[in-house]
Image (spheres, helix red, strand yellow):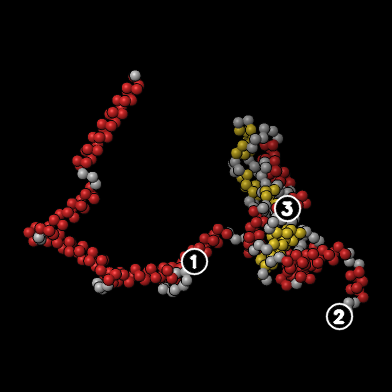
Amino acid sequence: MEATAEEVHHTEHVPQWKIEEVEDIKNLIQSYSLFGIVSISGIPAKQLQVMRRELKDIAVLKVSRNTLVTRALEKAGGTAKDLEDYVDAQIGLIFTNENPFKIYKILEKSKSPSPIKPGAIAPKDIVVEEGATGFPPGPIIGDLQSVGIPAAIDSGKVSISETTTVAREGDKVSQKLAAMLNRLEIYPDEVGLDLKATTYEGSIFTSDQLAIDVDQYFSDFTTAVRQAFNLSVNAAYPTAENITTLISKGVSEARNLGVNATIIEPQLMDTHLSKAYSQMLSVAQIVYDKDENAVDDDLKQTLTSAATSKQETESGPTTEEETKESEEEEESEEESGMAGLGSLFG
């Protein structure tokens, strides 16, 4: 299809650098698995350059005119074109092969505290803590009180009397309050790249979808895996992950069944004999307690030895052994004490 005269005329007057810029953005979108739009509003140019250097091993950060960005998105097509709605105000473009959740976390961690500007909206509750300020007495007391911060003189310094919330999240910060917060070195704002939206593997992720508690998510995932494993074992549903546990559980249950049902198998004979011997001793002990002459001498000796062994286990060392050890310890302590006195008096 041939271009109209108007389109040809328009193309002829588009500067070459704009054509190259659009093509460059389109190529970057197609070269990386993730493409995103970030807000750079309020970030000084110098600090933006620092951020670009810090991200150089992770991502490419590019700033261009919004009209050129929109044109590049149209040319790239696919899900990239769907990000046109996020091209407004001051934005930058980010390109990376990291997943969107990781790059969001990296950008959030890179933000730094910043003084809030007059007329700005408080991003969160702004709290001034109780305590000394380090300022000498003077007009600052009145300045503090004029913005709702209770202040007084304490030990020759200006002190804030009580912890006070001077602005709620969403409140507009006045010029006087912004100036005072700056003097108190309270920086409630943050400077950094705000990831607005990304396209990744055919899907679009917005900032609210990416703002997850990774530790909680990992904990929930671990709990789910453990519960799924327990369910599969209890339901005897074999998988590659639980087959060893299922076999061990089956062997243990089969062994217990064989012992309790007195099933004669070579693998169970030691357990059967040990169990029978223990039961025999229990019966013999009951009989012996009623009539000592009801058991023979060998069994009587066995019962007596078992009782003695049990008593020694419960009571610990014999009295004679304890007395001997105590006397040896006392003699050693006396000799040590005399040696100490001798060295003291020469």
Q: Image height check: is 53 above or below 225? A: above
User: Which corner quadrant holds the N terminus?
Assistant: bottom right
- Dot 3, how many residues are within 10 Å of its Cα: few (below 14), some (14-19), or many (20+)? some
Mark 1–mark 3 Cα distance, whole angstroms, equals 40 Å
- What is the secondary structure assignment of the residue under circle 1? helix
Q: Assess whether mark 3 and mark 1 are in contact (beta carbons under 8 angstroms).
A: no
Mark 3–mark 2 Cα distance, whole angstroms, equals 45 Å
In-front residue for pair 164/190: 190
- What is the secondary structure assignment of the residue under circle 3? helix
Q: Earlier in the sequence, mark 3 or mark 2?
A: 2
For residue 53, the mark is 3
Horizontal relation, residue 300 to residue 222: left or right: left
| Picture residue at 37% right of the left edge, 69% below the top | 249
Question: Given the image, on which type of amino acid does mark 1 rest?
Answer: Val
Question: Given the image, on which type of amino acid does mark 2 rest?
Answer: Met
Farthest-out residue, front: 266
Q: Image height check: is 20 above or below 305? A: below
Residue 159, image x and y in percent? 62, 36
Q: Is residue 121 visible?
A: no
For residue 58, the mark is none
Q: Earlier in the sequence, mark 2 or mark 1?
A: 2
Q: Is residue 131 visible?
A: yes
Residue picked out by circle 1: 225
Residue picked out by circle 2: 1
- What is the secondary structure assignment of the residue under circle 2? loop
Farthest-out residue, bottom: 1
Mark 2–mark 1 Cα distance, whole angstroms, equals 58 Å
| Picture residue at 13% right of the left edge, 56% below the top | 301
- Dot 2, how many residues are within 10 Å of its Cα: few (below 14), some (14-19), or many (20+)? few
